Amino acid sequence: MQQYSSKGASRGGVASCLCVAVATMLLPAAVAAQSNWLAAPALQARLAAGGVVMRSSFDRQHARANVDAAIRVRAAPQSIWKFITQCQYAKMLIPGLRRCTQLRAAGDGSWVVIEHDIKYAPLLPLVHSIFRADLQPPLRMDFHRVAGDLKDETGSWILQPDGAGTTTVEYRVSIKPGFWVPRSVVR
C-alpha cells in the first residue's frame, strides 16, 4: 500500500523546512538517486508551492517500511548540508531523538559512523541504531545499518540544486524494524 501526502511549509528557514519534511516521516534513515516519482506534475506543483511531498509503503511479506519525502528549499546545498550531517542539528530533523553521537569518521570526510537513540512513540521501546553514512558533500549522503535494534536500515539524503537559488531535498529510507510496530506508527 502506497500513500502520498503534502504538507504546507514556510520558506522561512532551512531548519524548519527540513524539520517538517522529516517530521512527516516517522522513521529516520534510503536507497539510490532521486527517483522518477518526483517527476509527476502534481508533485512538482506542490514542491513549487513550498509543500512537502511524501509517499510511503509497507511490504507485509518482508515487514519493511519504505518512505520517500521531498521539499524544495530556498538555499544552496552547502547551507543545507550541515543540517543533515552534524549531530548538533539532528534533534531538529529527527522526532524523538534522545542521543546522537559521532563514533568514527574518515580523515578525508568521505564517511562517518553515527549512533542514535530514538523514541519514535510513547508505547514503543527506545530504538538504538548505529549506521555508516557515506558522504558526497554537499549533494548526497547514503547510509546503512551497522548495528543496533533495527534489523535493516538503508537510506539517502539527496540535494539537487536548480541553479536558481533553490534546492530539492529528498529523503529516502527503507527499514525493517525486527520487532513489532503498529501499522499506524509505520504510516
Image (cartoon, rainbow, N blue to C red):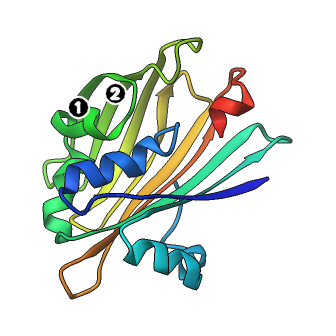
Q: Position of residue 36 (x, y in %)?
A: 58, 79
The foreground one among 82 and 3 is 3
Q: Position of residue 53 (x, y in %)?
A: 51, 63
The foreground one among 66 and 5 is 5
Tell me the residue at 48%/79% (across/down).
Answer: 44
Residue picked out by circle 2: 115
- Please tell me whether residue 93 is drawn above or below residue 156 in the rendered image: above
The foreground one among 4 and 124 is 4
Quarter assignment of residue 71: bottom left
- Please tell me whether residue 131 is drawn above or below residue 21 in the rendered image: above
Tell me the residue at 46%/34% (across/down).
Answer: 146
Say if mark 1 contacts mark 2, CB within 8 Å.
yes
Q: Position of residue 61 (x, y in %)?
A: 86, 42
Q: Earlier in the sequence, mark 1 or mark 2?
A: 1
Residue picked out by circle 1: 102
In the displayed orientation, state which residue is furthest to the right.
61
Q: Position of residue 28 (x, y in %)?
A: 46, 40
Give the left or right position of residue 74, taking residue 143 as reference: left
Quarter assignment of residue 166: bottom left
Q: Amino acid at mark 2?
A: Glu
Give the left or right position of residue 119, taking residue 116 as reference: right
Q: Residues within 10 Å of mark 2 (few under 14, many from 20)?
A: many
Give the left or right position of residue 125, taking residue 17 as reference: right
Q: Quadrant of the C terminus?
A: top right
| Disc 1 to disc 2, C-alpha distance | 6 Å
Tell me the residue at 17%/69% (across/down).
Answer: 75
SS label for mark 2:
strand
Q: Amino acid at mark 1?
A: Gln
SS label for mark 1:
strand
